[in-house]
Image (cartoon, rainbow, N blue to C red):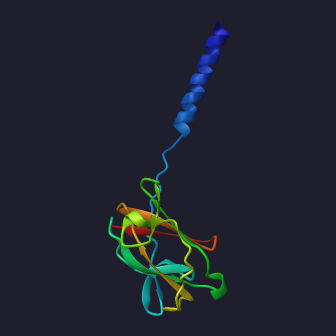
């Protein structure tokens, strides 16, 4: 009986110790700073991918011209853009096939890259849309290569 009581007491003390050692972690995200290319302000990843600093609003599609920097022969193929709402952790496609959030898609496979612009090697037009306001992490891939991610503040 004393042995069982001792085990229960040890388990309770260990439980209190483990619960007491856990601490809540809060991550404070901030929008990625803008950068300048040939006199124009961009949001994104300098030297990799970005677009002119648009003011995105919840549920309002925005026509966007993506700019890609790098070797011309490496900027080709499928473009994938993933959005993660940082408050909820919910992932969403951000590229739109038309001016409607109902036409959201994870990838563009049309291979439609245009001429150099503002120092970028290639550009690609699209619509972009966000279903919720708040901070969004935007992850960009070209032909399966992860270019990186940046954070946007959507009104």
Q: Is residue 43 above or below residue 84?
A: below
The spot of residue 88 in percent (x, y) is: 43, 53
Q: Nearer the viewer, residue 39 or 99?
A: 99
Q: Nearer the viewer, residue 138 or 78?
A: 78
The spot of residue 55 in percent (x, y) is: 34, 75
For the view shown, which residue lies furthest in the top direction? 1
Total labels drawn:
0
Rendering quarter of residue 111: bottom right
In the visual, does 100 lie left or right of 33? Answer: left
Q: Residue at x 36, y 60 (%)?
A: 132
Q: Residue at x 57, y 89 (%)?
A: 121
Tell me the quarter of the image containing the N terminus: top right
The spot of residue 11 in percent (x, y) is: 61, 23
Rendering quarter of residue 96: bottom left
Tell me the quarter of the image containing the C terminus: bottom left
Q: Nearer the viewer, residue 130 or 46?
A: 130
Q: Is residue 51 above or below residue 106?
A: below
The spot of residue 130 in percent (x, y) is: 39, 65
In the visual, does 24 lie left or right of 154? Answer: right
Q: Residue at x 38, y 65 (%)?
A: 101
């Amino acid at each position: 009986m004393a042995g069982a009581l001792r085990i229960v007491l040890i388990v309770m003390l260990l439980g209190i110790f483990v619960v007491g050692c856990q601490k809540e972690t809060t991550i404070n995200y901030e929008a990625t700073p803008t950068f300048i290319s040939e006199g124009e302000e961009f949001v994104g990843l300098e030297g990799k991918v970005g677009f002119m600093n648009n003011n995105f609003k919840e549920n309002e599609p925005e026509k966007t011209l993506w700019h890609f920097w790098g070797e011309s022969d490496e900027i080709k193929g499928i473009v994938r853009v993933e959005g993660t709402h940082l408050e909820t952790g919910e992932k969403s496609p951000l590229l739109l096939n038309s001016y409607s959030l109902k036409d959201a898609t994870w990838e563009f496979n049309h291979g439609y890259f245009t001429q150099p612009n503002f120092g970028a090697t290639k550009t690609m037009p699209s619509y972009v849309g966000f279903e919720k306001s708040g901070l969004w992490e935007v992850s960009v891939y070209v032909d399966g290569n992860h270019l990186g991610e940046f954070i946007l503040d959507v009104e």
